[in-house]
Image (tube, helix red, strand yellow):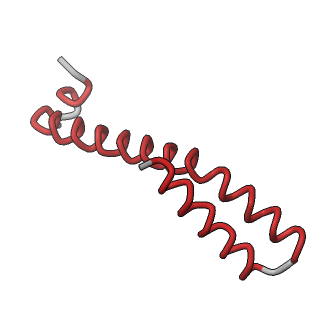
Amino acid sequence: MSILDSLGLGGVDWVFLLVLVIIGLVVIVLIKLFLVLIPAILVALLVWFLTGDLFWAGVAFLVVALLSLIAKI
């Protein structure tokens, strides 16, 4: 007997399992994306610190992110 059975929700075990698996996959993808984008974030912060301009920081972020994604392929 599971906790969901005691709450009267025994039939939705598979739904909860599916929701938890989807949440886990989203978390894994977000962590992987963050790890791939760390160099781009650091370069953008450096450019913003040196120039004080968010436009050039954004351009630097996009260029480094694009180069790192191309390098992964």
Task: Judge whether 18 appears above or below 56 on screen.
Answer: above
Q: Specify the farthest residue to the left.
A: 11
Q: Quadrant of the N terminus?
A: top left
Looking at the picture, does residue 59 appear above or below residue 1? below
Total label count?
0
Q: In the rendered image, which quarter is residue 41 located in?
A: bottom right
**Which residue is nearer to you in this view: 48 or 22?**
48
Say which quarter of the image contains residue 23. Answer: top left
From the top left corner, tell me how far across and down residue 50 is, in percent.
Answer: 90, 70
Instruction: Tell whether 32 sits left or right of 13.
Output: right
In the picture, measured across the screen, residue 20 lies left or right of residue 43, that is: left
**Which residue is found at the position 65% from the left and 50% from the top?**
38
Which residue is rendered at x = 44% and y = 44% of the image?
27
Front position in the image: 73 or 35: 73
Q: Residue at x 51, y 44 (%)?
A: 31
Q: Is residue 28 left or right of residue 10?
A: right
Residue 27 lies, with reference to residue 48, above or below; the image says above
